Image (cartoon, coloured by chain):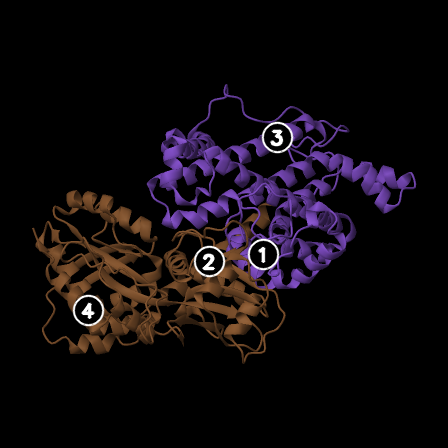
Amino acid sequence: MTSTTSPPTAGRRSDGPPSRPAPALRRSGRVRDRGASRVFRWAATGAGALILVVLAAVAVFLVLRAWPALTTPAAELTEKITWLRGADSLAAFVGPLVFGTVLAAALALLIATPIALGIALFISHYAPRRLASGLGYLVDLLAAIPSVVYGLWGALVLAPLVQPVWAWLNRYLGWIPLFGGDVSPTARVILTVGLVLAVMLLPIITAVSREVFLQTPRLHEEAALALGATRWEMIRTAVLPFARSGIISAAMLGLGRALGETMAVLMILSPGFLYSFKLLVAGQQQTIAANIAAQFPEANPLGVSALIATGLALFVITLLVNMAARAIVARRKDFSGAN
Amino acid sequence: MKLSLHRRAGAVALTGALALALAACGSDDPTGSGDATSGSDESVSTLSGELNGAGASSQEKAMDAWRAGFQSGNPDVTVNYDPVGSGGGRTQFLEGAVQFAGTDSALNEEELATAQETCSAEAIDIPVYVSPIAVVFNLEGITELNLSATTIAGIFEGTITSWDAAEIKAENPDATLPAVAITPVHRLDESGTTKNFTDWLGKASGGVWAHEADGNWPIEGGESAQGTSGVIQTVQGGNGTITYADESAAGSLGKASIKVGEEWVAPSADAVAVALDASPRAEGRAEHDIVIDIDRETTESGAYPLFLVSYAVACLQYEDAETADLVKGFLGYVVSTEGQEAAAQAAGSAPLSDALAADAQAAVEAIAAA
């Protein structure tokens, strides 16, 4: 995926209305493949099928292993699993976890998306060429940092740094329910988690939206400039509308990562099992992935099964999120740079 | 994108390789005394084979020392230990997947019954690792405090909220206590440390602590962290924070002396040994099944009753002689003076008392092939 310099690009990339390339150059089945060509076709088909097999295998594993917990009566569950925390059924236990997972991911997305778009626009439209490639490389490098390092950084460096900020928010904006309650003196709270997750999402969202911005048809941009638009107006009228569905799919890719993030959450958050919007209070929320990691080591067989059932819930949420993203992107396929 | 993916993959691979390299040079002979133990073994070892165990992560450091010490005396033996946690270790043992398990709580009746089938005879618990649990706090300028169980229960219950509260002042008339809020930190994962701490609070606090002994922290909400290192880090990161943790992990943080009878006792291996001697063996157990019924309310002078006993679980009879000899040899080393000394150096545990060590040795001797 290289940057596009002129609107009518070759190949299958449908690049906006001005010049629709001829129908895709895909080989139809009628032409007979020979030799290496045939081998390659089967290899590619096999690779495509493999991803479906893996997905199915994961789904089957989750359902099979979660089955004992799903079918055990609630009374027996609460008796045998010590960490159900007074929840009287599996659903009552999973509920707050789903809430916490979605809340953490939503916070991360809310913080990361505007910043990532800013970085991407700077790289694609503002920065001098040499700076742009260097900066792009740096952002990609962020994705290579293992999440356990983000977790350590968040718990040891970021949390003490942001604690005074959270205390300030609590003091002056405490009347907003989000910032109310007893502010945590260690900042091991969901907002800190959201902040660290946001940093982890930056490279994904930036990389995808940068590529999309670069594919805005040059003619659109020049037309906007010729009409007297400033650079900001050009971006607003030509680049952003063109890239909209690309941005959405970038954000959804990021959301997928945020939903499943484990180590960073485990190391930073003081968990609780409540439906609580208090972002600055310790012991309110917990995410599914972090809870699995925390409870797995000491869990008995039924406990493991219950944990896998929560994993199944996470699997379903992630699937739904990705399907929703696909649907949004597909609806605006013609204008999408990410397709 | 393509390019950046390559770069990313390269960086990830590099990080992975680094991690492997680091891990590879990490765990050789943590005791530093491996050679000494091998030298004292006069008869040439005839043991060989592989021995697998799994269980409590509390024993991990000590287990590393034991494995290193035992393997240097018996070069043909490989001992593996997977610190999956007490529950996981017991399950794997009862399923026959491992030959011994480490656990923070002894087998219960149901598990003993299951063991009858797995082991073809009974299973036994042998105390191998005794470790003081310290009440650790971070308060600027203060490294020692006297806190009774009642006060500690009040702090963790949330009824005592400031370091200059009257209860703490009364117990520390000489300390200059700041008006800093107390932030109790607990373990978020299920743990033997939490179970022993809540057990002690329940029995020694005179009813202030109204919860039962539990491996999961019984109070909803509040600050918490993962694992011993996690709570210690959290305490270090805050001011006015307090937690409970393995004494060896406390580092430079302040440690509380607790009230036993009329005196204040600081956490130490010696004080735990006194409390251990004052604790009877649990009743209704088989001859070689040694379970300690810790006396949390002891008033013995110099005893520190807030500690954790971790057990090794083994079969009394193994199907083949080779496995029996391996288990016997390894556990024999673990409960020996050398083994306990190695654990004390590596993990800061309290060595078993002479009487208990003799009982444990007798239990190990009783292990045989079916």
Q: Circle 1: is it few (<14), some (14-19), or many (20+) Cα within 10 Å?
A: many
- Return the x and y of residue A263 as percentages of the image width and height: 50, 52
- The residues bearing labels 1 and 4 have C-alpha atoms spaced at a distance of 43 Å
What is the spatial separation of the Cα atoms under label 4 and label 2, in whole angstroms?
Answer: 36 Å
Q: Which mark is residue B284?
A: none
Please, what is the three-letter code of the amino acid marked with disc 4?
A: Ala
Viewer-side label of 1, 3: 1
Crowdedness near tag 3: few (<14), some (14–19) or many (≥20) residues, C-alpha within 10 Å: some
Which amino acid lies under the numbered mark 2 shown in the image of this protein? Val
Chain in brown on the image: B
- Are the residues under marks 1 and 2 on the same chain? no
Q: Amino acid at mark 3?
A: Ala
Q: Mark 2 and mark 3 in contact? Answer it, CB < 8 Å.
A: no
Q: Is B61 rendered above or below residue A31?
A: below
Q: Colour of chain A?
A: purple
Which residue sits at x=57%, y=78%?
Answer: B141
Q: Which residue is mark 1?
A: A188
Q: The residue tagged with tag 1: helix, strand or loop? A: loop
Chain letter, disc 2 residue = B
Residue A37 appears at what percent x and percent y? 46, 31
Residue marked by disc 4: B357
Residue at which label 3 appears: A324
| Marks 2 and 3 belong to one chain | no
Crowd tier of the residue under label 4, counting other residues whose Cα lies within 10 Å: few below 14, some 14–19, many 20 or above: many
Q: Which residue is mark 2?
A: B208
Q: Nearer the viewer, mark 4 or mark 2?
A: 2
Residue B39 x %, y %: 18, 78
User: Which of B239/B319 is in front?
Assistant: B239
Tell me which label, 4 or 2, sits earlier in the chain. 2
- Where is residue A266? Give x, y as percent: 51, 52
